[in-house]
Image: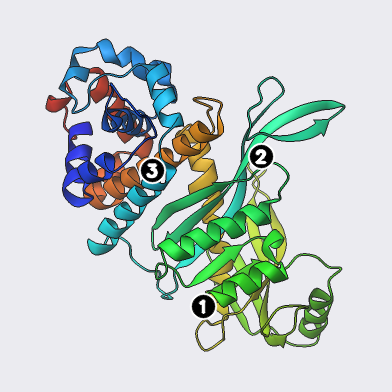
């Protein structure tokens, strides 16, 4: 499976150019940077979750057949710490360009590609501290932690992790998000149409930044104390739903009104409200329960470009960055593991994890046939990659 993955990545995604394009800041290097990058990507493909576990494979005969030579765990940590993050982001852009050129990134049925932004706390500790650590007081004891803001492009049946920006000491999530968005819109100017964010991003300066860049925005409207929320709530209370529909065990009633004004925002905004009811069957006595929920989104999309159901679908698509982003990377890809506690290493390991995740997802969804996808889960494919690292991998093929 590893041979098949690497062959696909090299042929379709230019894996060799992607790896050799990464640079580091060392003046003298005995270990090539490409060997370190390849070893880290192989570790993420196999989901080993540890540099020490990767180092133990160096002594196996199969490891000598790999394109890169064996590298110790200390060397990997030291080299990744000084990798040029600009070259990593350039490799990520090269990967996106290859996937786009090969028609592997398909727009959703409504035609709008969304960029989701959200913050994530990678880890926290009381014992170790670096220059990039944020601090907070927990019951009189200082806790150190790291947070970052991640950007993800949402396509049809594929979510592409684009970039991340660490939250620096003394600043909030929005400051890091603005810095990240400026870089993403500069490097990927035509990759997306609308920006998705949670209630924190319902912020006038942030919305203006998105509108000034020529993009649209959809954020959650949740603060009941704001004037625009009260106006929308009053307007929706005196009219019938614009759209009502059912999907699976859930039913939806949506209201849609425009021409709302938010203080300090340069243009009029539109608000979509959704009341949702889901039928849930209890496991113990098989009784049915109704779970209700209400969502409200604020958007700059005109109704002629995005109907009510399109805004509803995009509003819920923001959860992709939680489900196919943070949760999957943390639980299955060990992205929250601290391989080396320093700002550069934490940033670069996460960027490499995002590159590996994009390559693996593209291989699984585009290279494997549907019948094989039903027989093999993503975790099982990663176990086969790990088995290939431990055994004679050139003779290990998928069934």
Q: Earlier in the sequence, mark 2 or mark 1?
A: 1
One can see residue 47 in this view: yes
For the point 41% across and 47% down, the residue is 86
Residue at the disc numbered 2 = 284
C-alpha span from label 3 to label 2:
38 Å
C-alpha span from label 2 to label 1:
52 Å
Q: Residues within 10 Å of mark 3 (few under 14, many from 20)?
A: many
Nearest to the observer: residue 372 or residue 82? 82
Question: Is label 1 in a helix, a strand or a loop?
Answer: loop
Nearest to the observer: residue 115 or residue 238? 115
Task: Indicate left or right for 6 with 275 as reference.
Answer: left
Residue at the disc numbered 1 = 214
One can see residue 256 in this view: no
Q: Report the mark closest to the observer, 3 or 2.
A: 3
Q: Position of residue 51 (x, y in %)?
A: 41, 21
Q: Which mark is residue 357?
A: 3
As drawn, the residue found furthest toward the front would be 27
């Amino acid at each position: 499976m590893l041979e098949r993955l690497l062959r696909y990545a090299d042929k379709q995604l230019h894996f060799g150019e992607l790896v050799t394009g990464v640079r580091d800041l060392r003046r003298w290097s005995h270990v090539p940077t490409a060997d370190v990058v390849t070893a880290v990507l192989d570790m993420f493909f196999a989901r080993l979750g540890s540099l020490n576990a990767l180092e133990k494979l160096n002594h196996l005969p199969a490891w000598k057949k790999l394109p890169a030579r064996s590298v110790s765990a200390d060397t990997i940590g030291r080299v990744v710490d000084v990798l040029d993050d600009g070259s990593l982001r350039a490799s990520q852009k090269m990967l996106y360009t290859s996937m786009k050129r090969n028609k592997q990134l398909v727009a959703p049925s409504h035609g709008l590609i969304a960029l989701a932004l959200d913050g994530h706390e990678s880890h926290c500790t009381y014992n170790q501290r670096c220059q990039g650590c944020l601090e907070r007081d927990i019951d009189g004891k200082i806790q150190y932690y790291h947070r970052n803001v991640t950007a993800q492009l949402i396509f049809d049946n594929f979510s592409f992790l684009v970039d991340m920006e660490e939250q620096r000491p003394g600043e909030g999530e929005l400051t890091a998000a603005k810095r990240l968005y400026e870089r993403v819109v500069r490097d990927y100017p035509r990759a997306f149409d609308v920006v998705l964010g949670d209630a924190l991003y319902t912020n006038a300066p942030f919305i203006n930044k998105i509108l000034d860049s020529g993009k649209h925005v959809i954020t959650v409207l949740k603060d009941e104390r704001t004037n625009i929320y009260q106006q929308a709530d009053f307007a929706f209370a005196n009219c019938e739903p614009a759209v009502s529909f059912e999907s699976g065990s859930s039913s939806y009633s949506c209201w849609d009104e425009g021409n709302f004004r938010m203080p300090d925002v340069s243009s009029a905004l539109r608000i979509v409200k959704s009341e949702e009811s889901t039928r849930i069957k209890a496991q113990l006595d098989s009784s049915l329960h109704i779970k209700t929920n209400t969502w409200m989104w604020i958007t700059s999309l005109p109704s002629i470009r995005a109907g009510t159901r399109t805004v509803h679908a995009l509003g819920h698509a923001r959860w992709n960055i939680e489900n196919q982003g943070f949760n999957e990377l943390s639980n299955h890809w060990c992205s929250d593991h601290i391989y080396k506690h320093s700002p550069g290493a934490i940033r670069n390991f996460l960027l490499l994890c995002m590159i590996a995740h994009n390559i693996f997802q593209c291989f699984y969804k585009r290279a494997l046939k549907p019948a094989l996808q039903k027989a093999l889960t993503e975790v099982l494919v990663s176990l086969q990659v790990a088995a290939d690292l431990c055994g004679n991998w050139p003779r290990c093929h998928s069934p």
